Image (cartoon, rainbow, N blue to C red):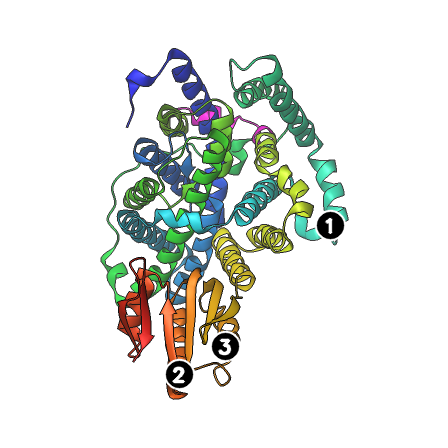
Amino acid sequence: MFTIQNYSKQNIKNDILSGALVAVALVPEAIAFSFIAGVSPVVGLYGAFIIGLITSLFGGKPGMISGATGSVAVVFIGLGLSVKKLYPELDTDALSMMVLHYILFTSIVAGVIQIAIGMMKMGKFIRLVPQPALFGFVNGLALVIAMAQLRFLAPEQIEQYGSWIEIVKASFTENYVMYIIIVITMAIMQFLPKLSKAVPAGLVAIVAITLVVYFGEIDTKTVGDLADLSNVSMPTFTMPPLELFSWQSLSIILPVAFIVALVGLIESLLTLSVLDEMGGKRGSGNQECIALGLGNTTSGFFGGMAGCAMIGQSVINFTSGGLGRLSSFTAAILLITLVVSFSEVIAEIPVAVLVGIMFMVSIGTFEFSSVKRLKHMPKSDAFVLIVVTIITVLEDLAVAVIAGIIISALVFAWRHAKIMAQTKEVNGKKIYELEGPLFFGSVTSFNEQFDVLNDPNEVIIDFKQARVMDASGVEAIDAITEKYRKNGKKLTLRHLSQDCKKALLTAGPFCTYEEDDPTYKVAKNV
């Protein structure tokens, strides 16, 4: 919650001004993501307000911005198609309302799943995402943010053009004013902070260019052209229809809710990690899981779609000086205030200004240093970075991150899939001194080290420089013990770790333990 006593006047000013900038930037994004999901813009705006408000108060990272996002909205596309197949008899209006009910109920269920994950303290598993995968996520998301702005620059009746070259030419011809405004906005964002940081550069760009466009009667797309915001009111509590609790409906809702929950958590926790890197102060992943789940559940009950952290707006907030909870709280409150009370003012903001701001966010988000590091990275890490970037752009965040983790895990296993042995003979006994990890990947290498038939009658395997990592390693020890027993030879296991001894006692019937010296215990076959 807020700790006002820790706020200086400078903190308060920066948080409020930065929150105001983010609030304005949230409006077109929420509207656009609503269109992606196939619902009214109001659904995205309500989601942005409610999720943003709750995560600002209870989230794991002060100043992080959450709301309706494209990664979650994309998941709802498939849900809408499933609902249309389930209710083919409904007319267009009734079908749209039914899709909305399914999306809201799915948001509620996804929120409950996220709360459960946070309560079980599973947010820490974000640490399993390797640094190359994190770079790939950030770079891919930066490209997605930039590409998402291109739809605002598309020419009218785009289907009549036969090639991308024709589309680009038509875009410049029809929307040249937008391109000019975008360049001016980006210039303000780039150079104003070098002169003064008293007011966020993005907020200056929005106010100044909106006034010029309005009073200069310049013809360009505005937020009002994207959606009708004239009848937006405060959100009200709504219960899901009882028919959604049927097995037929739940069979559609539960899988989608699980995907929404995972996508939301992955994007939120990775955004938290990115902000941790930028600010050096660590947030709480488990707290963020619970806060996001509470926000999505509440949003579903009040007519808003599910969402998660928004890396673009979070970076805007962070770089504009909004480091405390007051900034994200201001953004949420001002968002609903602007939409409900000042919709006519919001409607006059040129879309090109917001596009320019998001282009600068995309540039600021992209880890250009990772490109320079590519030639110095191990080839496997470079491969992970590139693959995660491509999958983030072409598929979605959850698939990209999971693919990155799997590839990194397989590469790690391959690198360490060898265990070596130095041998020596002392008093007629052959000693194998192992070095390396013994796990599922190195079992074959482990078995290749021993010459059971030609070894003397007494053999010692020394694990001082080795570590048994999993059940496969335990089974390998069990198997080699049995081989020596069948050949009538005595095998002693030396310097085993305590956890391995316990595992052998549980899994293997061939080993028992007795004191060998005061320093360690040994296991030998009987």
Q: Amino acid at mark 2?
A: Lys
Whether residue 278 sits left or right of residue 152 in the image: it is left
Q: Amino acid at mark 3?
A: Phe
**Residue 265, position in %: x, y?**
39, 47
Real-space Cα distance between discs 1 and 2? 75 Å
User: Could you tell me which residue is drawn at 29 percent across and 18 percent down?
Assistant: 4
Whether residue 381 sits left or right of residue 335 in the image: it is right
Tag 1–tag 3 contact (CB < 8 Å): no
Q: Which mark is residue 115?
A: none
Q: Is residue 484 visible?
A: yes
- 490 and 81: which one is in front? 490
Ranked by sequence position, the earlier of labels 1 and 2 is 1
Query: Does the stretch in magenta take in 230?
Result: no
**Residue 194, position in %: x, y?**
62, 16
Disc 1 marks which residue? Answer: 164
Q: Amino acid at mark 1?
A: Trp
Disc 3 marks which residue? Answer: 450
Disc 2 marks which residue? Answer: 489
Ranked by sequence position, the earlier of labels 1 and 3 is 1
Could you tell me which secondary element the residue under label 2 belongs to? loop
Could you tell me which secondary element the residue under label 1 belongs to? helix
**Residue 173, position in %: x, y?**
74, 37
Mark 1 or 3, which is nearer the eye? 3
Real-space Cα distance between discs 3 and 2? 13 Å
Which class describes the residues within 10 Å of circle 2: few (<14), some (14-19), or many (20+)? some
